[in-house]
Amino acid sequence: MSATDAIDWDKMAEFTEKIWEDSALPSLEEFIKIPALSPAFDSEWQANGHLDKTIDHFLGWLESIEIDGLTATVHSLEGRTPVLLLKVAGTGDGEVLFYSHLDKQPEFTGWSEGKGPWIPVREDPWLFGRGSVDDGYGGYCGLISLMALQNQGIAHPSCTFLIETSEESGSPDLPYYLEELQEDLGTPDLVVVLDSGLGDYERIWVTESLRGLVGGTLTVSVTSEGVHSGMASGVIPSSFRLTRKLLSRLEDEETGELIPDWLHIDISDQLRADSAEIVSVLGEALITDFPFLDGVRPQHEDLVEALLAQNWKPTLSITGAEGMPTLANAGNVLRTHTSLKLSVRIPPGVDSEMASAKLQELMESDPPFGAHVTFEPETAANGFAAPPMPVEIAAAFSEGSLKTFGAASMPFYEGGTIPFLAMMQESYPSARFLVTGCAGPGNNAHGPDEKLHIPTVKNLTQCVAAAIASMSN
């Protein structure tokens, strides 16, 4: 008998529905109200105390639920963001490590009327607010999945929950805790990460890859003070033009392709075939789910090429700028410098430290016209490619998707980055990974109107329960 045969799916659906509606969603709404910016966006995070408040809030929710064998400890290394460690004693074989985070991205602009980053708004099937889908729901989902198994007397492995508060900054503090808590974390057979995405809301998707991330601030300086543009232009080279020239070393402005071969991996025939399978399900939604303005064309018309470019090829994004006055304050002055924040996504398999060093060398070497050029790298993060999932776990998870959604699970690629995954893969090379989540089309994590799809998180909870139960069957 398989693990899923022991599950009363109607009873599990009723149980998860009640816990989410009566307990978890109200708690998640209160979590949204906490402006817990990740430390990269709040230099005064210690004094402000919002990250600590998220942990206190989650601990308060734990006191309101009934789960057998639960212990909770808070860990705060000097000068480091805090982590919450939960342990649930197993009633069957195996060890599982759950991961999620409580820190958040900045507010951003453009929220719809009546909505805001710290204002929880429920408009079924959505719950709006910063941190709703990235990644406030994760801890609730994992724990409720265990509660659902205990409710039916179904055995489950020993489970550890590592909930951190610096993920949106690239998890700079996590390596210190992985070393400090090595004994507590044990040797997991399976790592469950509930911080990923979905291709649609008609099934559960399992993330098989994520890109890594390198970047930093490029500054090109030409003068010690601003000079009248009518007098100086034509003599003093424009810092903006020189910045463009440097970026052309990195990116082909006609195609958007990145030029250096050290940023690329070989795209195998199997990867193209797997991508075609995903495209056969998603279709044009791969492109049309994005908020293009009328008349704007995608970078790739071929959907398979678009999927590969989004997930398995390097890309450049300019995410910020300094040295430029606002339009209202822009006079006829040749500016002293131009600073741009570069964000480069790298494919799994490209070493981030190597890429970061080469990127700095590419930008700073042989500066055009002798301009003063600096590139200040930020924390680099490797990508992730999942090892094959054990057949019984994959089958149970897919069965859960079939029972709850009416469609089997699908593989998925993510263009984003979860630094924790590469860290864990290096720490536990024999572990398997179940990476999934609720961030489907329109969720708008990091942007305005971030929102959680409520029916999906309830279904996901049951799918995770099935996967966990299969380990102790």
Image (cartoon, rainbow, N blue to C red):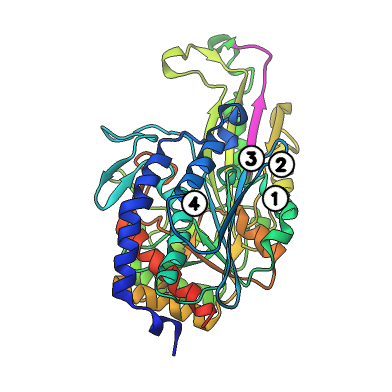
The three-letter amino acid code for the residue at tag 4 is: Thr
Secondary structure of the residue carrying tag 3 is loop
Distance of label 3 from label 1 (alpha carbons): 10 Å
- Does the stretch in magenta take in 216? yes
Residue beneath the point at 49% across and 79% down:
470
Count up the numbered dots: 4
Residue carrying label 2: 77
- Does the stretch in magenta take in 68? no
Earlier along the polypeptide chain: callout 3 or callout 4? Answer: 3
Residue 81, numbered circle: 3
Point out residue 9 in the picture as x, y percentages from the top left corner. 32, 75
Residue 255, numbered circle: 4
Residue range in magenta is 215-226
Asked if disc 1 and disc 4 are in contact, CB closer than 8 Å, the reply is no
Earlier along the polypeptide chain: callout 3 or callout 1? Answer: 3
Point out residue 90 in the picture as x, y percentages from the top left corner. 57, 71
Point out residue 428 in the picture as x, y percentages from the top left corner. 69, 67
The three-letter amino acid code for the residue at tag 3 is: Thr
Distance of label 3 from label 4 (alpha carbons): 41 Å
- Mark 4 crowdedness (10 Å alpha carbons): few <14, some 14-19, many ≥20: few
Earlier along the polypeptide chain: callout 4 or callout 2? Answer: 2
- Note whether residue 101 is visible: yes
Secondary structure of the residue carrying tag 2 is loop
Asked if disc 1 and disc 2 are in contact, CB closer than 8 Å, the reply is yes
In the displayed structure, 355 sits above or below 286; it is above
Residue 177, numbered circle: 1
